[in-house]
Image (spheres, rainbow, N blue to C red):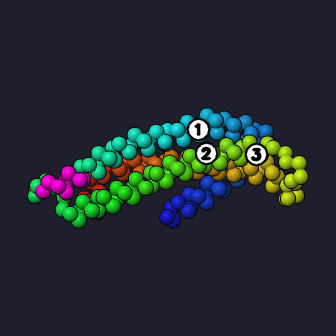
Amino acid sequence: MRKKQIIFIGIIIISLILNSSIDSVVMKGLLEKLIFNSVSILVGLSIALSGIFLSSINTVYLSIYRMTKTKKKKESFSDEEIQMIKSKLTELVDELRENSMFSLYSFLSVITLFFIKEIDFPYIQWFIESEIITKIFVFDSIILIGNFLIFWSIIDSMEVVFKISKAFELVREE
């Protein structure tokens, strides 16, 4: 958990530094390209990745079920090892699901914020009077943070997929 907090704080700092260093007109073009080209493709890939590996995960669960039904002393795991594999696999599946849902919801939020930042609401005025912290700066920073979090979520999903592929080795690693 500590690692994720450090990464989150790092993403916020990097996003704010980038946003303050880049001209707002250039940032607008970059965010458009980033959102509609890179992020949308990666979120789709993340969802497809989850779907593809769910069938593999079901195969692993079926293998675990068969191991519990057939007891060959030399080739099977003990009941404790099977329970450990099941619990670790369940944790990994839950993390993959959370990453995929986070990517999808973050993507929808980023797109919504991208359009909201361009709307000028008639009776709503930006409450911070600053030349630096403008409405566009805040929205661009949040959008940039959201994009980097989506990238991190996809990277974490890939790590989870590789851990799932080694599901039967989990017992032997510990």
Q: Is residue 32 visible?
A: yes
The alpha-carbon separation of the residues under discs 3 and 2 comes to: 14 Å
Amino acid type indicated by mark 2: Phe
Query: In the rendered image, which quarter is residue 12 located in?
Result: bottom right
Q: Earlier in the sequence, mark 3 or mark 2?
A: 2
Residue occupying the point 55% across, 51% down? 102
Residue that numbered label 1 is attached to: 40
Disc 2 to disc 1: CB gap under 8 Å = yes
Residue that numbered label 2 is attached to: 107
Question: From which residue to which does the magenta span run?
Answer: 64-71
The alpha-carbon separation of the residues under discs 3 and 1 comes to: 18 Å
Q: Is residue 18 visible?
A: no
| Residue nearest the viewer, comparing 34 with 117 | 117
Image location (x, y in percent) of residue 172: 25, 59
Residue that numbered label 3 is attached to: 116
Q: Earlier in the sequence, mark 3 or mark 1?
A: 1
Say few, some or many: other residues with alpha carbon within 10 Å of mark 1 (under 14 / 14 to 19 / 20 or more).
Answer: some
Magenta residue check for 66: yes
| Residue nearest the viewer, comparing 98 with 142 | 98
Residue occupying the point 52% across, 60% down? 4
Amino acid type indicated by mark 3: Ile
Against 116, residue 41 (above or below) is above
Query: In the rendered image, which quarter is residue 31 located in?
Result: top right
Amino acid type indicated by mark 1: Ser
Residue occupying the point 52% across, 38% down? 44
Against 27, residue 149 (above or below) is below
Q: Earlier in the sequence, mark 2 or mark 1?
A: 1
Against 87, residue 20 (above or below) is above
